[in-house]
Image (cartoon, grey):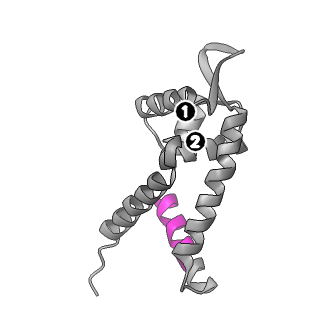
Amino acid sequence: MSRRLVFDLMTAERALRRRIDARSGDSGIGAAGAGVLFHLAQHDNALIGDVSAAMCASPSGMSGLVSRLEKGGLVAKTPDPADARAVRLSLTPAGRETVGLAKSVVRELNAEMSDGFTDAELAVVARWLGHITHRLT
């Protein structure tokens, strides 16, 4: 069997992002925006640099994404009290509501993607993905 793991993984990731983006409806947040919202739901009032690092995003990419989320009323930016050059991000009430909606989309996608696989098979997939992440970061 020819293993095209890199190609297959990247193709699957693009398909997943397209599905999430299509399901984002009028919010326009898409997969990347949902990732920021999920991170802030667990780490509210986080430094923008910490969010960028958690998302493995470039500062310029994160800046544009945060601007769109702020314009959409989902996040608020505030200066860091200890360092005026630093910016903190927090979810707005609309952002918290959007996190709930995004979680339901992710639950549906997880169910769809795991359909037909046993728990043991999914555990191997999860272990493999974690291995990749650990080895390459």
Q: Name which residue lies at 44% across and 54% down.
A: 22
Image quadrant in which the N terminus is located? bottom left
Disc count in the image?
Answer: 2
Disc 1 + disc 2, Cβ < 8 Å: yes
Residue identifier under label 1: 69
Stretch of the chain drawn in magenta: 124-137
Which quarter of the figure has residue 48?
A: top right
Which quarter of the figure has residue 110?
A: bottom right
Q: CA distance from mark 1 to mark 2?
A: 9 Å
* Disc 2: CA contacts within 10 A as few (<14), some (14-19) or many (>=20): many
Identify residue type, mark 1. Answer: Leu
Residue identifier under label 2: 36
Quick check: is 131 in the magenta stretch?
Answer: yes
Q: Nearer the viewer, residue 25 or 46?
A: 25
Q: Would residue 40 appear left or right of 28 to someone viewing this image?
A: right
Q: Name which residue lies at 52% across and 36% down.
A: 52
